[in-house]
Image: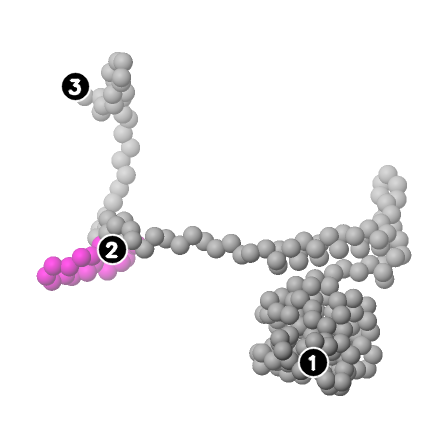
């Protein structure tokens, strides 16, 4: 168990201190993302310092390669937002949020080096941890690319449409009240009853052709 300290707006939103059973900075990011739905989005959109130690000013600054591989030991972990011109800003290693998320959620297959055997009716199919790791890495990269891709926005309607298309609408719901109006108003109609009649329409005429109801012209 170790203490994870969030600084700045991140701490104001989710809390400043947490005690988690994690071994690396990547595990800490995954644990906080699992407990707070908006945590991953906030991390992705920022730039951060990861500092191991009791205090930020005297602690050890972690880099991108330390996110998943470096063991924190018994020391605390500080997640500090990058601020240009800060006292230790030039000494601390800055990590992009998308890189931090990508490394924290990357699938490492070192612990799955043992072959997993699956028996089939036609023989034995062997799947090694390396194959699983490659698949996990591909999934992780696809996830990071989706985070970097801009979000598509629906086209906004033209606010200068004519009154013919944007006027009051008619009401078709069953049981809707019928308004009682005094004076001149602009309002939509209320359908009292309706029906559909199906008729056979004969096609007559030669050359250009015409459509009639079957009666004489």
Mark 2 or 1: in front is: 1
Q: Regarding mark 2 in the picture, which secondary structure is present there?
A: loop
Q: CA distance from mark 3 to mark 1?
A: 96 Å
Q: Magenta region: which residues?
A: 168-188
Q: Is residue 176 magenta?
A: yes
Sequence-wise first label, 2 or 1: 1
Tell me the quarter of the image containing the N terminus.
bottom right
Which residue is nearer to you in this view: 56 or 102? Answer: 56
Mark 3 or 1: in front is: 1
- Residue found at x 51% / y 54%: 152
Left or right of residue 126, residue 77 in this image: left
- Residue found at x 82% / y 51%: 131
Write down the residue under mark 2.
Answer: 168
Mark number, residue 88: 1
Q: Residues within 10 Å of mark 2 (few under 14, many from 20)?
A: few
Which residue is nearer to you in this view: 212 or 7? Answer: 7
Question: In this view, which residue lies farthest toward the left?
Answer: 183
């Amino acid at each position: 168990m170790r203490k994870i300290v969030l600084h700045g707006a991140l701490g104001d939103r989710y809390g400043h201190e947490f005690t988690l059973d994690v071994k690396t900075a990547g595990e800490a990011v995954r644990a906080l993302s699992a407990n707070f739905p908006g945590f991953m989005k906030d991390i992705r959109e920022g730039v951060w310092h990861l500092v191991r130690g009791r205090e930020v000013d005297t602690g050890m600054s972690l880099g991108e390669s330390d996110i998943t591989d470096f063991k924190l030991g018994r020391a605390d972990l500080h997640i500090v937002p990058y601020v240009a011109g800060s006292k230790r800003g030039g000494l601390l290693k800055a990590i992009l949020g998308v890189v931090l998320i990508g490394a924290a959620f990357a699938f490492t297959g070192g612990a799955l080096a043992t072959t997993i055997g699956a028996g089939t009716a036609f023989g034995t199919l062997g799947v090694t941890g390396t194959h699983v790791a490659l698949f996990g890495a591909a999934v992780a990269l696809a996830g990071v690319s989706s985070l970097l891709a801009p979000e598509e926005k629906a086209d906004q309607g033209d606010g200068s449409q004519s009154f013919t298309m944007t006027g009051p609408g008619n009401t078709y719901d069953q049981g809707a009240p019928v308004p009682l109006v005094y004076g001149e108003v602009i309002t939509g109609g209320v359908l009292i009853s309706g029906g559909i009649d199906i008729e056979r329409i004969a096609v007559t005429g030669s050359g250009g052709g015409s459509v009639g109801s079957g009666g004489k012209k």
